[in-house]
Amino acid sequence: MAQPPQMDPFAQNLRDQDAGAAFVLQSKGEWWHAGFHLTTAIVGPTILTLPYAFSGLGWVLGFFCLTAMAIVTFYSYYLMSEVLEHCEKAGRRHIRFRELAADVLGSGWMFYFVILIQTAINTGIGIGAILLAGQCLEILYSNLSPNGPLKLYHFIAMVTLVMIILSQFPTFHSLRHINFGSLLLSLGYTFLVVGACIHAGTSKNAPPRDYSLESKMKTRVFSAFTSISIFASIFGNGILPEIQATLAPPATGKMVKGLQMCYAVIFVTFYSAAVSGYWVFGNKANSNILNSLFPDESPSLAPTWVIGLAVIFVLLQLFAIGLVYSQVAYEIMEKKSADVKQGMFSKRNLIPRIILRTLYVIFCGFFAAMLPFFGDINAVVGATGFIPLDFVLPMLLYNMTFKPPKSSFTYWINMSIIVVFTGAGLMGSFSSVRQLILDANKFKLFSSNVVG
């Protein structure tokens, strides 16, 4: 008896009825727009933690791990782009990470696994962006009014209000100008921080430099894997298929140009921030290099206006980062709530969009205010989330799609990356959980002091 034909759950005729695809993931962009989106997704204030990551590895291992992570992630994103292009040429254009994984691996469970990981990462970054932006405002306020009455949660509320307004940009593509500004901001605060580090390192008040690692081997190993987890999280980008979806079809070759733009910015910012910060502060580098340059208990090591301007640039970029990583949540919402047959700005679609996006941002803002120790939680999410999305699935999807011979170099390099980074992810998760436990006694809900 003949089997009835199976319906393709990702067929184009079904996507034409999908408001999340038609509205939020509108495909109109050029390759440089993808470059702007990618840069915002990867190059953020987390680069200010790079000197701290070097302090757990030293000069040689620090350079090696940073370079290896850059090469592996570029390779990983390139492979994923190749898989997406292959599927598009075969008549199966995928615009969501979960659809791509489910189609190539032939598993409905993979669909839910990816959406779970993506949601955890993207919501975590949304919460973290609001928290850090609130902290930036608090830093500026405390310097202008040291004894002022406002607390951290007041600034988080202000940031949340601004994010609610910005969240109403209807499509991912509509963020292209904001994300170009984000790219310029990342270059701006990097150059300011590098200049401040050089000033601090050459001044008469330059701190003593010690590049030695932890004396106990156990502690040294944990520090090393924590540093590797930081590198993995910094390079992480779990929304590449959604970014590629914003390109006007055919997407062939466009994403690689966008990646090249993004990694040119990465090269300039990551290496200069890591080298200058670690050169000045060595193993005493703070998890945020701005805190090392502007310590509470001693005079500033750089001009106040430089640090202030860098903080303003970071604050502004955090709005763009929060917007980019919220797009997956918005497309899920609009897929369920909007009617693609009516206009994007029709009353039928506009009112649910305003309500749902406002509620989502309020949710993120509430958790940012309640959990000012979210950095430690994010380290765990980063180690457990970015590893499978960025270092395992792309290689697996490539091998499943193109089926390179098991004797080929490509097959074995892909399998080696999967094995090595799965192990690194497990160790990084363990060390991140360990740090979370060690800091647990400092945690206090709705505190004005950020832990981590």
Image (cartoon, helix red, strand yellow):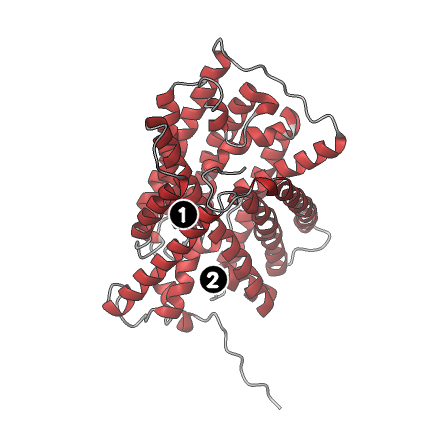
Mark 1 touching mark 2, by CB under 8 A? no
Q: Which amino acid does label 1 sit on?
A: Gly
> Where does residue 382 sit, x and y in percent of width and height?
56, 47
Q: Which of 344 and 282 is in front in this view?
A: 282
Residue 397: which numbered mark, if any? none
Q: Which of 187 and 402 is in front in this view?
A: 187
Q: Is mark 1 on a helix, strand or loop?
A: helix
Asked whether residue 200 is in view, the answer is: yes
Front disc: 1 or 2? 1
In the picture, the quarter occupied by the C terminus is top right
Residue shown at 42%/37% (left/top)? 135
Numbered-mark total: 2
Label 1 crowd (10 A; few <14 / some 14-19 / many >=20): many
Q: Which amino acid does label 2 sit on?
A: His
> Where does residue 95 sit, x and y in percent of width and height?
45, 60
> Where does residue 87 sit, x and y in percent of width and height?
51, 62
The reply, left or right, for residue 192 in relation to residue 400 is left
Q: Distance between the residues labelled 1 and 2?
A: 24 Å
The reply, left or right, for residue 392 in relation to residue 259 is right
> Where does residue 220 sit, x and y in percent of width and height?
71, 31
Q: Is mark 2 on a helix, strand or loop?
A: loop
Q: In this view, does 55 lie above or below 427?
A: above
Q: Name the residue under label 1.
A: 322
Q: Nearer the viewer, residue 311 or 440?
A: 440
The reply, left or right, for residue 296 in relation to residue 248 is right
Q: Mark 2 points at which residue?
A: 94
Residue shown at 38%/35% (left/top)? 138
In the picture, the quarter occupied by the N terminus is bottom right
